[in-house]
Image (cartoon, helix red, strand yellow):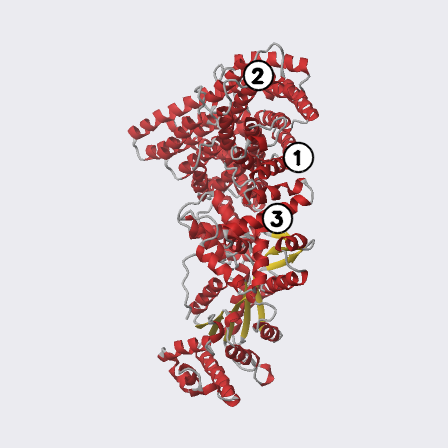
Amino acid sequence: MPQTSFITPLIGREEELARLSGLLERARGGEARAVLIAGDAGVGKTRMLDEVAGQAAGDGMTVLTGHCVDLGDVGLPYLPFTEVLGVLAGDERFADALAAHPVVDRLLGGGTDAVRDMGGRLRLFEGIAGVLADLADIAPLLLVLEDLHWADQSSRDLLRFLLSRGILQRAAGGAPTHRLAVFASYRADDLHRRHPLRPLLAELVRLPAVERLELRPMADAEVTRLVRAVEDRPLPDATVRRIVERAEGNAFYAEELVAATATDVGGVPSGLADVLLIRFEQLSDTAQQVLRTAAVAGRRVEHDLLREAVGIPEDELESALREAVGRQLLTPGDGDTYAFRHALAREAVYADLLPGERARLHGAFARLLAGRGHRAESAAERAHHYRESHDLPEALAASLEAADHAQRVGAPAEELRHLEAALELWSAVDATERPTGEGVDQVTLTLRASAAAAHAGEAHRAVSLTRAALAGVGQDADSELAARVRYTLAGNLMTVDSLTAAFAYSSEALALIPADPPSRTWVWAAATHVMAARQVGASETALRIARQALAIAEQLDVADARADLLVSLATLEGGGRRTPEGRERLREARDLARGSGNAPVEMRALFNLAVGCFESGDLDECLPWLTEGLDRARRAGLLSSPYPLEMRYLRLLVLYTLGRWDECVGAAAADAEVLPAAGGYTVAPALYVALARGDLGAADRARALLEGPFDWMGTLVAGIVLTEAAAQRGEPEAAVERMRSTVTALTDDAGTLPDVTVRLAALALSAVADRTAALRLTGDEAGSRGWADTATELRDLARSTAARGDAGPPQGPEGQAWLARAEAEWARAVTGPDAAAWANAVEAFDFGDVYERARCQLRLAEALLAADRREEAAVQARAARETAVRFGATPLLDQLTSLIRRGRLSDTPSTADRATILTAREQDVLRLLALGRSNRQIGEELFISGKTASVHVSNILGKLGAASRTEAVAVAYREGLIAPEPSGSDRGASSSTRAAGRRSRGF
């Protein structure tokens, strides 16, 4: 029986499991088969075999498992078969089978008599084959042999006999004789060129009843699922990504790395290192020396560089490399290079080096690379080797060179890494040995690092670095440098929503330098102060300084500063960015920024152009601006910087609003691959889709956005999803509490409520109105009045936020639509359904939000029905149902189906009308429904998913006004919508023909 028990669910391997399950089915039918399962150590062979064995046992098969063990040069003969026979001997069910072949008793006693001569070996082999055949006659049999790479010679000989002449052989005429399968596993990475298993495998795979199955490394997404499954503690996304990267598809490595996170031990866990070093320690001394040297070089090393570093004759080097390649520790690559087969193996070898040995080899590689000339692309390597060899002045110089190269190629994350390395080295290097030149001082380098952090999307790190720069500015520092540090800090603080502090620092920056004589530094300090002032509600101050700074920027011909100020003025003056005048100013800013080469300012202009379209309800016009902005960010290497993140979110939101949900989900998944740490910016609208389609797990995913430092967008997204989820669950208390806590968290330091307050209030009001409606039905007027007070409070909050008081113009079409819904929900909560209020909400969402319009149509249909305006109610309900079906919005579809059934809204059309409102697909589904098919069976016959079939069934029930599947079929027969199916053998023949057709097309 299977010896291993796993708690972790099997992740992935669906294709391999399906293949093995199919072979087991054939074996149960009398067709004996064998599979040789290859895979690297730890890739999941044992886990998969355990799963298959469990399935086989559940299907009534006898499962026997034998293990080969690494016993060096003193291996025990027939060890896996002795283990199997030992299990059989301990089970009285198999006593007769063993008694019929007494020769096998010799193996249970050690096997010495059985192998004295060739005749004895043959009788033993035939006896074991006979036992297995007899067992297969009792019940189908699965024989599992694990770790054949450790099998002794006798076991290999016996396996050859069983598969070539014994249990897999066919009787005369070719008829299969045994209900048996053999699954044997081995480590592919252990099979060096002269491994004794190699010739046997080559011989066996030529047999017609033997197949080979290779388990390849798992995909990154599957390893991610595995990591989440094996660890009860929630692991940070960055930790999970690092584990996935290091594991490289190996399940065992991933589990060991997860276990190591509990102790916060760096490097390779000791247990894993022991496993990885076993094969290394089997190499010759010279080969070990070569691998140690290669490990210092990194994952990959050039042949010439390795030869010079290791310092041995060419023939010895080639012999050692051949040995390492044969043992599958190194693999040859392009360009005359060698790479470690697995990065963790390289880490284990590297960790095994002595400290002095490690430093010496790093120094050798640093000098060799430097001797090739100071190529920019090798600067990062040189910096690493110099640092590890403790040559700190050279490491500092190379780190700065590497940072310059990263900046030129648009790689801000790498630039940040090299600058931080340089800053760490700065104080350790004597001042006389530090690089010199303009901008090469600690404060300026720290400022540059903060800019790189901001461009890489590390907003909090950018703030921390700028604070460090501020701490390094002394009393006698240049006033322009002191101002630069402060306005840079202000800009970074705005990205983490520390608005009051940002305004304070921008004020200090502006006060440090005079406006006259004009200077670039003052212009940029003013531009930053304008943004900070607007954020804290000081719009008059922002407008005044923006106009003054624009005039000076034009005087100095500072094009990018002019562009930045034009963007600010476009949002401050007149009707703002929604108006044609505002958009024209933004286009001018875009052109100025592009001409000056300032990508961040250009992207700010493009973002505001897109937002202006969105706020005006011009959703289709919004997308081209977003496409242009993201393309510019991609070319500049700034996809993780603030404005591109905002543009990514807005693009997803537009797709969601327009009802292009599948595009939205696909784009969100693609963004998450590129920006896995971007939180709400990349997942928000996809979470809205998931919740609208009935996936309440979206709430858990949204709650995860609240972990870690405060994130404005993550808080907003979580607030929307969790408020909506509470409303779907019928929990108004939770919905109102979530709405209030979200608004409090998002309210800025000046007390300005976020625009999303209107939407949140409407969502919470929906839950409140559901509760008051339920209380009225039970006659609880007191309870209903209590909730009515809450409803009024929420309605008033939505009104005041949408109006914005004196802070700016009223909200655009989206905000006004949510306000209309809030008003209608308030009326539903306080007085009951109000058709006029809901008609207003339906019209308001007609700006482009198809799903929210359908939700309002549901409520309008309820209100019309309450007013006995049945035909109008039916029109609204049908329109909303079509949207719900098209989007796969199951919760909304269920509500509409219930309303149509309860209100008998489907009774209004005639029989002929009913036939025409059923689509061709629905008529196919109805026909199969009449045959008693389940949703899964309907899906299989129509080549659609079971979930899609369920949506079609719900749609049919609604259109026919039926409360159940049975009633729907009865209505369909009564009104002649379907004809009775043929009965008896004709129906069976039809089904068989359809099934054969599916198989012939590969389904």
**Position in image of residue 395 (x %, y %):** 58, 39
Amino acid, disc 2: Ala
Please give the label number shown on residue 408: 1
**759 left or right of 793?**
right
Quadrant of the rendered structure where residue 510 is? top right
Provide the secondary structure element on which disc 1 rests. Answer: helix
Provide the secondary structure element on which disc 2 rests. Answer: helix
Q: Which residue is mark 3?
A: 365
Question: Which numbered mark, 3 or 2, is in the foreground of this view?
Answer: 3
Q: Which residue is mark 2?
A: 526
Count of numbered marks: 3
Between residue 398 and residue 564, name the one nearer to us: 398
- Look at the picture and state if 515 lies above or below 705: above
Provide the secondary structure element on which disc 3 rests. Answer: helix
- Look at the picture and state if 43 lies above or below 267: below
Near mark 2 (Cα within 10 A), the count class, few <14, some 14-19 or many ≥20, is many
Task: Kindly identify the residue that appears in the image at 40 percent across and 37 percent down.
Answer: 726
